[in-house]
Image (tube, rainbow, N blue to C red):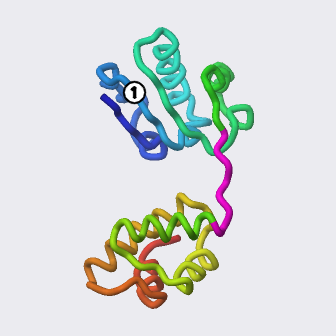
C-alpha cells in the first residue's frame, strides 16, 4: 500500500501525530523541505528515515533543493536525507511546459489555444507544478461555467486565487 503526503500540509499538524504509516509499503512525501527548520518535524522524519534503513518501509520524497542546501535545526536530519538514491530532475523549458500543458489539457477535454498558453506562461510562474495547478483550477471553472478556456475565463477564474 502507498501513502502520499504533502509536507506543507503536514507541518500544520503536530509532528507527534504523524503515525499509522507502518502498515504501508511505500511512504511518499512531497515538498519535504517544508519541514526544514521545524525541530519536531525534523526529529520525526529522522526516525522515519531510520525505519526505512531498518527495512520496515520504503520512503520516497521530493525536495526543491539538494539536502546539502537545506537550512535545518538537526544536522542528523539533513545527513539522513542523503542516505538513499538521489535523482535530480531537470527543469522544463517554457516550450516543454507549454507542450505538457497542452497534452494534459487534451486528456481532460480542454483545448488550449496558442494565445491561452502564451498568456499563462507570460502572466504566471513558468514552472510545471504551478501551471498544472492552474490548469486544474481552470478545468473546474470551465466545467462549472460551461465555458471554453479563454483569456477572459482565466482572468476571472484566477482573480479569486492569489497566484
Of residues 113 and 141, which is closer to you in this image? Answer: 113
In the image, is 102 to the left or to the right of 107?
right
Q: Position of residue 46 (x, y in %)?
A: 54, 21
Taking the spot 26% from the left edge, 84% from the top edge, the residue there is 146
At x 56%, y 77%, the residue is 120
Residue 84 position by quadrant: top right
User: Taking 12 as reference, is 147 left or right?
Assistant: left
Please name the residue that numbered disc 1 is placed on.
Answer: 26
Taking 92 as reference, is 38 left or right?
Answer: left
Q: Residue furthest bottom?
A: 152
Q: Quadrant of residue 138?
A: bottom left
* Viewer-closest of 123 and 71: 123
Residues in magenta, as a range: 88-95
Q: Position of residue 33 (x, y in %)?
A: 59, 40
Circle 1 — which element?
strand
Q: Is residue 76 above or below residue 93?
A: above
Residue found at the far top of this picture:
54
Q: Residue 75 at what x, y percent from top left?
A: 68, 22
For the N terminus, the image quarter is: top left
Q: Is residue 59 above or below residue 98?
A: above
Judge the density around disc 1: few (<14), some (14-19), many (≥20) Cα neighbours within 10 Å. some
Q: Is residue 98 magenta?
A: no
Which residue occupies 74% across, 37% down?
A: 69
Amino acid at each position: 500500500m502507498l501513502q502520499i503526503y504533502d509536507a506543507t500540509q503536514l507541518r500544520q499538524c503536530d509532528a507527534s501525530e504523524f503515525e499509522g504509516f507502518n502498515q504501508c509499503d511505500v511512504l511518499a512525501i512531497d515538498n519535504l523541505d517544508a519541514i526544514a527548520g521545524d525541530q519536531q518535524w525534523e526529529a520525526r522524519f529522522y526516525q522515519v528515515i531510520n525505519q526505512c534503513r531498518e527495512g520496515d518501509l520504503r520512503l520516497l520524497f521530493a525536495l526543491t533543493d539538494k539536502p546539502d542546501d537545506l537550512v535545518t535545526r538537526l544536522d542528523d536530519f539533513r545527513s539522513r536525507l542523503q542516505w538513499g538514491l538521489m535523482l535530480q530532475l531537470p527543469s522544463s523549458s517554457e516550450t516543454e511546459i507549454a507542450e505538457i500543458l497542452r497534452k494534459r489539457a487534451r486528456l481532460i477535454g480542454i483545448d488550449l489555444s496558442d494565445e491561452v498558453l502564451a498568456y499563462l506562461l507570460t502572466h504566471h510562474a513558468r514552472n510545471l507544478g504551478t501551471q498544472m495547478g492552474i490548469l486544474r483550477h481552470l478545468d473546474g471553472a470551465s466545467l462549472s461555467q460551461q465555458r471554453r478556456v479563454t483569456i477572459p475565463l482565466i482572468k476571472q477564474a484566477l482573480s479569486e486565487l492569489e497566484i
